[in-house]
Structures are given as C-alpha cells and as structure tokens.
Image (tube, rainbow, N blue to C red):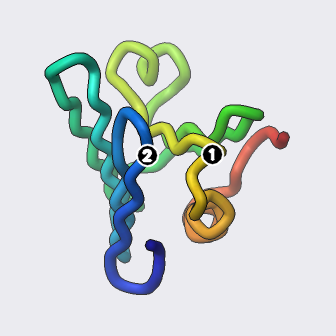
Amino acid sequence: MVGAGCAFTLFKGGSVTIGPDFIEGHTLVGRCTFKKRLGREQIKSISENKRGLSVMSRGRFATWMLGFIFIPATVPEYQEIKSILSGWVPIQGGR
C-alpha cells in the first residue's frame, strides 16, 4: 500500500518501503536478506525497462558492484510507486 507518510510493498523475493524522503529495498537471496536504503537526495538516476524500475545512487558500473533498488513491474502498486519516484528524479527509458 502506497500513500503519504510511509508505504510498504511486498513482492516475491523482497520488499520496498517508501517514506517521504527515502526508499528502502530488501532483497531475499537464499537465507540472506540484503538491505539498501537511499535518501531522496542520494538518488542519481532511475531507469525503467520491461522488468521494472532500477533506483540508483551511483553510475552504472558502481551500481552493479554496490547495489541498487529494484521494483518489479509486476507489483500491484507499480504505477503509484513510479509516480512518486518520478517526482523525485526523472525516469529514464520506457517500456
């Protein structure tokens, strides 16, 4: 559910939380959960492809090495999440 304040979205393999000035992703890999939290001011770019949105705080190479937050296009709140994030940083690419 997404709205003002703080929102939490659960999907297979992880979850995303969006607050008024941050986004936080949790990704489950086997028995380990990896957490990545980015403040609104840390986000350098957001790209979209047919699989979903990638929220990045660094250039492409560093992003793949140090992580990013991924929101699958299959989550029910995808369009609402995309709308919130596009108000923070322009979204590159398109589906």
Picture coordinates of residue 58, whole percent (x, y): 45, 31
Front-lying residue, 48 or 1: 1
Front-lying residue, 9 or 59: 9
Q: Is residue 42 left or right of residue 87?
A: left
Q: Amino acid at mark 2?
A: Phe
Q: Secondary structure at mark 2?
A: strand
Q: In the figure, residue 28 lies in which quadrant?
A: top left
Earlier-in-chain disc, 1 versus 2: 2
Question: Which quadrant is home to the C terminus?
Answer: top right
Question: Circle 1: is it few (<14), some (14-19), or many (20+) Cα within 10 Å?
Answer: few
The answer to whether marks 1 and 2 mark residues whose Cβ atoms lie closer than 8 Å is: yes
Q: Which residue in the rendered view is the most extreme toward the left?
A: 31
Q: Is residue 67 left or right of residue 33?
A: right
Picture coordinates of residue 52, whole percent (x, y): 64, 39
In three-dimensional space, the C-alpha distance between marks 1 and 2, rounded to whole angstroms, equals: 8 Å
Q: Which residue in the rendered view is the most extreme toward the bottom?
A: 4
Is 54 rendered above or below residue 11? Answer: above
Q: Which residue is mark 1?
A: 74
Q: Is residue 41 left or right of residue 54?
A: left
Q: Which residue is mark 2?
A: 11
Residue at the spot x=70%, y=40% of the render?
48
Question: Circle 2: is it few (<14), some (14-19), or many (20+) Cα within 10 Å?
Answer: few
Q: Amino acid at mark 1?
A: Thr
Q: In the figure, residue 50 lies in which quadrant?
A: top right
Picture coordinates of residue 81, whole percent (x, y): 56, 63
Counting the numbered discs, the total is 2
